[in-house]
Image (cartoon, rainbow, N blue to C red):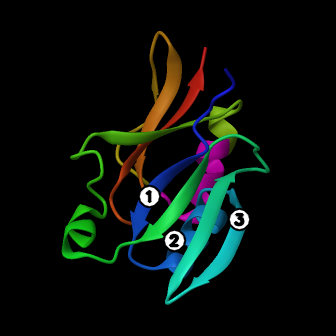
Amino acid sequence: MDQHIANISLLVTDYDEAIDFYTKKVGFSLIEDTDLGAGKRWVQVAPGTQQGSALLLAKASTPEQIAAIGQQAGGRVFLFLQTDDFWRDYHAMTLAGVTFLEQPREESYATVVVFSDLYGNKWDLIERK
């Protein structure tokens, strides 16, 4: 059986501000932006030109969805951005204005730091040992 997770849906308030954050501050590529009509779009962003999992930016449209923006993991780290060069990406993201919630730290398994996206979702930037 050949299966993989293709997309992870991330609730956003606005497609364009989310695209701007992920492409200009985090360094992702815009993989697809297709108009579906009625104000909906199919928007995928991913690290580099990655062919694996991508974020599907989903504009919140109900009160429940709006309330969940920035809290999709209940305040825990939600997503993990693994890199092959922690310090390159950390410095680039810092210069781009990404908010880091702690200082980078060396753990037995990785170099890691927690950052926040534009809505408050927590991410780990991580380089595994």
Front residue of this view, candidates 54 and 110: 54
Dot 1 alpha-carbon crowd within 10 angstroms: few under 14, some 14 to 19, many 20 or more: some
Overall secondary structure of the magenta section:
helix
Dot 2 alpha-carbon crowd within 10 angstroms: few under 14, some 14 to 19, many 20 or more: many
Q: Which mark is residue 18?
A: 2
Could you say whether the residue bearing mark 2 is in a helix, strand or loop? Answer: helix
* Residue type highlighted by circle 3: Leu
Most extreme residue toward the front, as rendered?
A: 1
Alpha carbon distance from label 3 to label 2: 11 Å
Could you say whether the residue bearing mark 1 is in a helix, strand or loop? Answer: strand
* Residue type highlighted by circle 1: Leu
Q: Which mark is residue 30?
A: 3
What range of the chain is rendered magenta? 89-98
Front residue of this view, candidates 83 and 8: 8
Asked whether disc 1 touches disc 2, contact meaning CB atoms under 8 Å apart, the reply is: yes
Residue 128 is drawn in which quadrant? Answer: top right
Q: Is residue 66 left or right of residue 121?
A: left
The image shows residue 93 at horizontal and vertical percentages of 59, 54
Residue drawn at x 45%, y 41% is 79
Q: Is residue 54 left or right of residue 39?
A: right
Most extreme residue toward the right, as rendered?
A: 49
The image shows residue 108 at horizontal and vertical percentages of 47, 9
Q: Earlier in the sequence, mark 3 or mark 2?
A: 2
In the rendered view, tell whether residue 18 sits above or below residue 4. Answer: below
Residue drawn at x 60%, y 26% is 127
Q: Earlier in the sequence, mark 1 or mark 2?
A: 1
Most extreme residue toward the bottom, as rendered?
A: 38
* Residue type highlighted by circle 2: Ala
- Judging by the rendered image, the residue that carries numbered circle 1 is 10
Residue drawn at x 63%, y 34% is 86
